[in-house]
Image: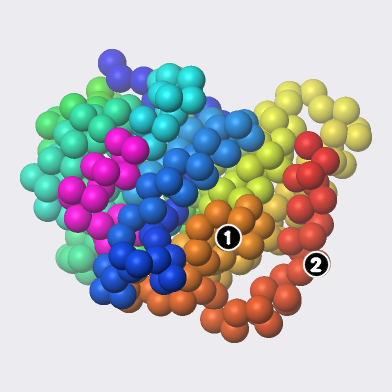
Amino acid sequence: MASPPPAGVYVPVPTFFVSKKAANYNATAAPLDLETQAAHSLHLAKSGITGLVVLGSTGEAVHLTNKERFEVLSSVRKAYDNAGYKNYPIIAGTAAQNIEEVVDQLKSAKEAGCQWGLCLVPGYFAGASTQDGIIQWFTAVADQSPIPVMIYHYPGVSNNVRVVPSTYATLSKHPNIVGCKLSHGDVSYHAQIGASPKIDHTKFHTFTGLGQQLLPVIALGCAGTIDGTAGFFPKSVVHLYKLSVKNQPTDEEVKERRLLQYKVSSVEEIVVKFGTVGIKEAVSRILGMGDRDGTRLPLAGGIPGGDKEWEAWKEVIGDLDAVEKSL
């Protein structure tokens, strides 16, 4: 029986591309910046992050060729191995809808050194999709995958396709399906999956995709978060997780974690509003890594409004930045 990724805080890392100022820049398909990719990955590990999701939605998986996918995944693994982070958890995302291509990407991910795959729910035919069809799709992928897989439910990029709690309960019984990421704000679904008595939670871990609801979903049985804000304020989100899993917190710890959840939730509105563009903007401005308009078409430029928009977030960012620097 395959094992799920360890509980904790994971970061869906962006894929870094070279600056527009670089000699090899190509406006149609900016080249990869593997040096920055490695530096950011190592910063997160040193900050206490449990593991990474590489080539998820934040990683612009749909904008990369399969050859580039392998380059990114293998470069991150090499960076960790060279820095002494042997077996550091790496979850490889897939966004294809053809079963054969998804399986090929999972095989390549294993070759690159990844231990798990995170497979986006296919949503092109959302109007005609059935729960049985979704179950059969994931079963076919998991049957052929050389690494354990997780269900990635992000309605915002999957044509608003629904995956109901009973579908997770069914798929959790597959020996090669070990968890899920729920990138939506339906806390009831988090409860119906994370606390379900029909799921063996030692073998199937439920992660929220929104750190802004980390404290409440931990109480509902979720294993942690795969969170964009942790990509630029990693210590703060890790600290919130540690406070959230305490069974008998002191009164001071209860107050601290509530206030910290408020601050994380407030900053996370940037991620909710701007997605990967907002995350890259924050990573660039706060950590000084990467080019904040370093995306691939049709994504273009940094956050709309530039400096003026960023200034509007100054207070909430400053509040969490102070926490980050204190840890």
The residue indicated by pointer 1 is 284
Tell me if residue 68 is in the magenta stretch.
yes
| Horizontal arrangement in the rendering, residue 218 relative to residue 24 (left or right) | right
Applied colour scheme: rainbow
Which quarter of the rendered picture does the C terminus lie within?
top right
Q: Which residues are magenta?
A: 60-75
Which quarter of the rendered picture does the N terminus lie within?
top left
- Per the rendering, the mark at residue 315 is 2
**Is residue 284 among the parts visible in the rendering?**
yes
Give the crowd class for mark 1: few <14, some 14-19, many >=20 residues within 10 Å.
some
Q: CA distance from mark 1 to mark 2?
A: 18 Å
Give the crowd class for mark 2: few <14, some 14-19, many >=20 residues within 10 Å.
few
Where residue 271 sits, quadrant-wise, is: bottom right
Pick the residue in front: 270 or 305: 305
Q: Position of residue 49 (x, y in %)?
A: 57, 34
Q: Residue furthest top?
A: 1
